Image (cartoon, grey):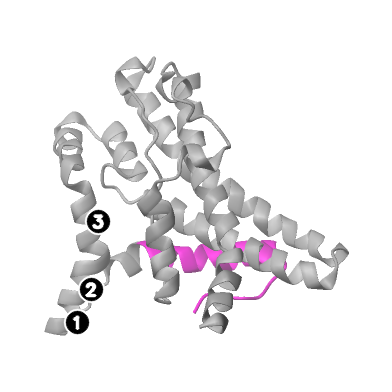
Amino acid sequence: MVQEALGFLAVASVWVLPVLLAITLHEAAHGYVAWRLGDDTAWRQGRVSFNPLRHVDPFGTVALPAMLLLLKAPFLFGWAKPVPVDFRRLRRPRRDMVLVAAAGPCANLLLATCAALLFHVLPILPEAVAGWVGRNLLNAILINLVLAIFNMMPLPPLDGGRIAVGLLPGALARPLARLERYGFLIIIGVVFLLPMIGRQIGIDLEVFYWIVIVPVNWLFTLFAALAGLTVTLQ
């Protein structure tokens, strides 16, 4: 029991900082860009902040990832509290909605780039510390790529869905926007239910794998090369 607890703490110690940084910068970026484009809703609520406590969702950010770690799930899944944005207050709502939505994934790609570049600093650190820092940086690359790609799925309320609504002609944008109330249920279905059904009927329905994991694997190879590594995802 003690060994299992220590093992969990060791794993958690190299995931907590990357996850908190990833969700904090993602959400703060949404709020900051919205504020600069005319909507100060997030600013007034203290959400344009680097304080992770402002963005943490008790279940989606803490309980669910911890449970997945304990169950040794093949991937982590979770979410932060959405940043409030009143699109009607933006100076050019249709265009600015796209910019606000894109800010989160762009912040994650920037963080992944910074993590990759910081690998080149590891040789100057003490060996014992360098190993732990390296694990954090590697996980930072991974979690930020997952967040960026996952959030770009073209389904509201994900960022990709809001970008699609802002870019598509009205005849296509309106029905897509109406899906937002069902968006979370559709995501659960794509991530969990479709693969289960596919395994039962013998058909590959791993849609999440093809639209998220495959691009993440490809990008991870590029960022690992930027870090001077040759590791790949299994």
Residue 67, quarter of the rendered image: bottom left
Q: Nearer the viewer, residue 190 or 128?
A: 128
**Spatial distance from mark 1 to mark 3, Cα to Cα?**
18 Å
Crowdedness of circle 3 by 10 Å Cα count: few (<14), some, many (20+)?
A: some
**Image position, residue 94 (x, y; %):** 32, 24
- Location of residue 220 (image quadrant): bottom right
Identity of the residue drawn at 52% across and 75% down: 233
The vertical placement of 45 against 70, above or below, is: above
**110 relative to 54, above or below:** below
Dot 3 falls on a residue whose secondary structure is: helix
Q: Quadrant of residue 138?
A: bottom right
Dot 1 or dot 3: first in sequence order is 3
Q: Amino acid at mark 1?
A: Arg
The answer to the question of whether label 1 and label 2 lie on touching residues, with beta carbons closer than 8 A, is: yes
* Residue 77 shows in this picture: no
Residue 172, how many percent across, how many down? Answer: 17, 37
What are the residue bounds of the magenta stretch? 212-234
Q: Which residue is mark 2?
A: 195
In this figure, which residue is indicated by the disc labeled 3? Answer: 187
- Count of numbered circles in the view: 3
The kind of residue on which mark 3 rests is: Ile
Viewer-closest of 56 and 42: 56
Say whether marks 1 and 3 touch (CB < 8 Å). Answer: no
Residue 113 placed where, x, y %? 63, 52
Q: Secondary structure at mark 2?
A: helix
Q: Nearer the viewer, residue 193 or 126?
A: 126
Q: Which residue is mark 1?
A: 199
